Image (spheres, rainbow, N blue to C red):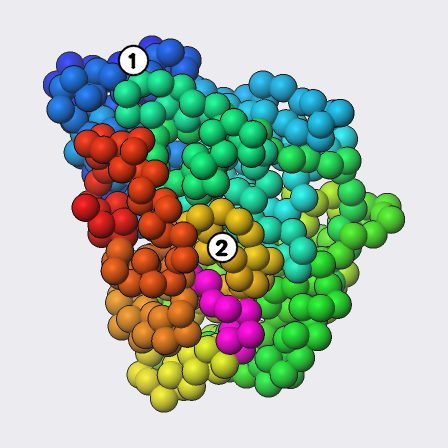
Amino acid sequence: MGTATAAGKSGPGTRTAWHNWAGNVTAVPARVVTPSSVEELREAVRRAAGDGLKVKAVGTGHSFTAAAATDGVLVRPQALAGVREIDRAAGTVTVAAGTVLKDLNVALAREGLSLTNMGDIMEQTVSGATSTGTHGTGRDSASIAAQIRGLELVTADGRLLTCSEKEHPEVFAAARIGIGALGIVTAITFAVEPVFFLTAREEPMGFDRVTAEFEQHFAENEHFEFYWFPHTGNCNTKRNNRSQGPAAPPGAVSAWVEDELLSNGIFQAVNSFGRAVPAAIPSIARVASRALSARTYTDIPYKVFTSPRRVRFVEMEYALPREQVVEALRELKAMVDRSGLRISFPVEVRTAPADDIALSTASGRETAYIAVHMYKGTPYQAYFTAAERIFTAHGGRPHWGKVHTRDAEYLARVYPRFGEFTALRDRLDPDRLFGNDYLRRVLGE
């Protein structure tokens, strides 16, 4: 990751390369700043504008796109961290933008509180996760950004805007997922609720069965997702539903299978071998997918929703109208089966209800997601190109933080409120102080 010196300034003449988590994006900013207060951040924005430099904020680099890349001023928000206020009467928590989700989850649990839904990793900053539309899976509960009740934003002229449904509502409607185009988020207020228990039920299931029963599983469970193992007819399903408890975490053996075999240590070794010997991948996939067994466990939300991810990969994910996801997944399987591709990572399928955020992948429509992955260092373009062709044929919307090739012309067709967002950007950042090559491609000039 890029580095920065203290007190909001970088050393003279310092040009430190920044790399994202997956290593597929690199940037060499003119300077790196780590502001320790909102006032320092506002001054850094004003100074960059005066120097004719672009400004981008970057979290922990978990995006696979160049959304945060810049050759101007790179802002690291890590010193702007921590819980500012818990309002139990309103059911909200306000946190500084550089707070890591893991720290937020632990702090909330200590207070007997929780977010309603979350993604499957928690290493991102709250501002990075929400700005790119990070989500989990849910029938009724939506993305992390959809749980935002207010936010603070430093705009291109150095002002600090406070936004909510009542204050600057037109900014609030867009800035919850702003891809860094509208300004730099300094604080976020989330809706929270008393902590609760989730019971997770994981069960292997055949591809034909899980796709045939997809709508039934979706309707019957608060949080349903599944993974399909390419080159096999095998899937692993996960159903999370609220329960009375008590906590009954996974046993040592099943935790080892999930955390090491499927996610980390052994999975890393298997993928490294598959990268060296691609012909072995289908056999490995069949063995790995058959190693799964059913298990049930209960715990507080973040211990059920999230898990460690140490194996590095590159990912593409598209949001499709939910009623089209099964057809698209069957097309993806048929494409892989007839191709010479060798895919060592499972394909993940999740859902989200419609929301009201302008550039949310679930904006205005019931949504299901298909995510495809490739191990870091493995050529992914052929697989992702073929998958993207399928997803776009179904009106898919790409995740803002994951690999895709779409441009503003395409995105304006699949987002009914795209023009609303770009008009707001024209008003808040007419000189594109917060612009970069990625935003030029996806939002236009």
Give the vertical position of 299 relative to 5 (above or below): below
The residue tagged with tag 1: helix, strand or loop? helix
Point 64% across, 47% down: residue: 117
The tag on residue 43 is 1
The reply to whether the magenta stretch includes residue 279 is no
Amino acid type, callout 1: Glu
Q: Residues within 10 Å of mark 2 (few under 14, many from 20)?
A: many
Contact flag, marks 1 and 2 (Cβ < 8 Å) = no
Query: Which image quadrant is residue 210 in?
Result: bottom right
User: Total marks drawn?
Assistant: 2
Residue projecting furthest to the bottom: 338
Decide if residue 180 is on the left or right side of residue 444. right
Q: In this image, 426 relative to 260: left or right?
A: left
Q: Residue at x 41, y 15 (%)?
A: 38
The region drawn magenta spans 317-326
Who is closer to the viewer here, 410 or 60? 410
Name which residue type carries label 2.
Answer: Ser
* Residue 238 visible to an observer of this rendering: no
The Cα atoms of the two marked residues, 1 and 2, are separated by 34 Å
> In the rendered image of this protein, does residue 336 appear above or below residue 45?
below
Mark 2 sits on what residue? 363
Q: Position of residue 187 (x, y in %)?
A: 49, 25
Q: Quadrant of residue 132?
A: top left
* Quadrant in the rendering for residue 314: bottom left
Chain-order first, disc 1 or disc 2: 1
Locate the N terminus and report the quarter of the image it occupies.
Answer: top left
User: Can residue 443 be seen by looking at this rendering?
Assistant: yes
Q: Which numbered mark, 1 or 2, is in the foreground of this view? A: 2
Q: Identify the disc placed on residue 9.
A: none
Of 367 and 120, the residue lying toward us: 367
